[in-house]
Amino acid sequence: MSSATVAVIAIAAGWSVTVGLVGALVAWLLRRRSVRWLAAVLGVVAVTGVAAGVVGTARAMFLSDHDLTVVITVCAVSGLVSVGFALWLAGRLGGTTRRLRDAAIRFGDGGEFVGPDDAPRELADISRELTRSSVRLREAAERERRLEESRRQLVAWVSHDLRTPLAGIRAMAEALEDGIAVDPQRYRAQMRTEIDRMVTMVDDLFELSRIHAGTLQLSMETVLLGDVVSDVIAGADPIARAKQVHLGGHVDPRSLVRGDAGALARVVSNLVMNAIRHTPADGAVVVEATAAEREITLSVTDACGGIAEDDLARVFDVAWRSGSARTPGADVGAGLGLAIVKGLVEAHHGTVSVHNRDAGCRFVVTLPV
């Protein structure tokens, strides 16, 4: 490499580095200003650095005054045009960032995030992430609203369901104390029945509170689902017979699942008892379980007549009931059974769903093997 070439390189680099350092200082001073200014500085520095390098080299080459003037004119015109385009692009970038900011402000005020469509890739990535966050927050807010509504209903319904048997127990106790009870033995039996029902309700509330608080402790072991289903059917069969409901089913002998035997029995029992409760006389409740390579599917099918489509999404909500009645009876609970089912199934990393089928409903529980 000749000495002249080295000199040209040194001169061009010197002018360009000088312009770059000045531009870096200006960019640092404007670091808190709009990105439009930073983009403009970037364009100006790039163009000015090239122009300064060309002009400085041209002067060192001892060109004639005419030639030097031509070089300077070309650099000036090209530089001004390039700077103009840089400022135009910087303005568009600044407008995009302002629209992104305005969308974020609306999102922060509770609105839906709608980002600009023509943003550069980095800003578009931010816009997509904010859009996903907007969707997740909206879904979380909807879940929170539904949960709060369920809690209010739970307090109202449980208060009513506890108040009614307590009033009955109090009336029967006063009748026994005053000696006006026609059949004291029947009164005592009825009081025991009401107390047992209230104890069951309180136990359900305690179980549900542990599930929601994340303090539920599961004793995981290998469970043969067929044994669990057989025990539940044996225990529920007298109730089904009393209601003239046919109860039966079939379980794949390979249905081995890793879980808590007591919790799984509670899941099956709640589903079976719920099915019996809503199945009319001469109807059938069928429990089935099939084994696949990676999951076990348990289903409980009843003849309840189906659930309204608007209510299918609320079946597993706390305190949801299939009717509007508020007077508790022997076959009416506090609306906690299916909520407990969902909590226990999810604690086993499974899923539970319900859909209408023929003249009834089919609850499906899927558990990982």
Image: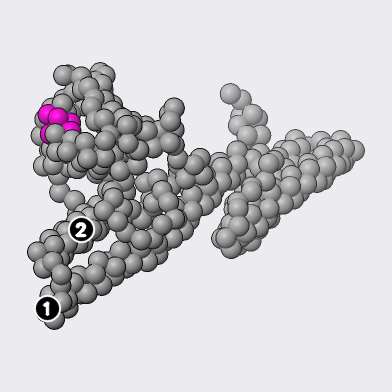
Residue highlighted by disc 2: 197
The reply to whether residue 361 is visible in this rendering is no
Q: Residues within 10 Å of mark 2 (few under 14, many from 20)?
A: some
Please state which of residues 122 and 231 is positioned toward the viewer in this rendering.
231
Please state which of residues 254 and 315 is positioned toward the viewer in this rendering.
315
Where residue 54 sits, quadrant-wise, is: top right
Indicate the position of residue 340 as horizontal and vertical percent values.
27, 48
Q: Which residues are magenta?
A: 227-233
Q: Residue at x 41, y 48 (%)?
A: 322
Tally of numbered discs: 2
Query: Does residue 36 belong to the magenta stretch?
Result: no
The answer to whether 147 appears left or right of 169 in the picture is right
Residue at the front extreme? 182
Where residue 53 sits, quadrant-wise, is: top right
Name the quarter where the N terminus is drawn.
Answer: top right
Looking at the rendered structure, the secondary structure element under dot 2 is helix
Main SS, magenta residues: helix
- In this picture the colour scheme is one colour
Amino acid type, label 2: Arg
Q: Residue at x 45, y 40 (%)?
A: 307
The reply to whether residue 98 is visible in this rendering is yes
Residue at the right extreme? 66
Name the quarter where the C terminus is drawn.
Answer: top left
Please state which of residues 314 and 184 is positioned toward the viewer in this rendering.
184
Q: Residues within 10 Å of mark 1 (few under 14, many from 20)?
A: few
Residue highlighted by disc 1: 179
Where residue 201 sits, quadrant-wise, is: bottom left
Indicate the position of residue 244 as horizontal and vertical percent values.
26, 35
The answer to whether 342 appears left or right of 234 in the picture is right
Q: Which mark lies nearer to you, 2 or 1? A: 1
Q: Residue at x 64, y 54 (%)?
A: 103
Amino acid type, label 1: Gly
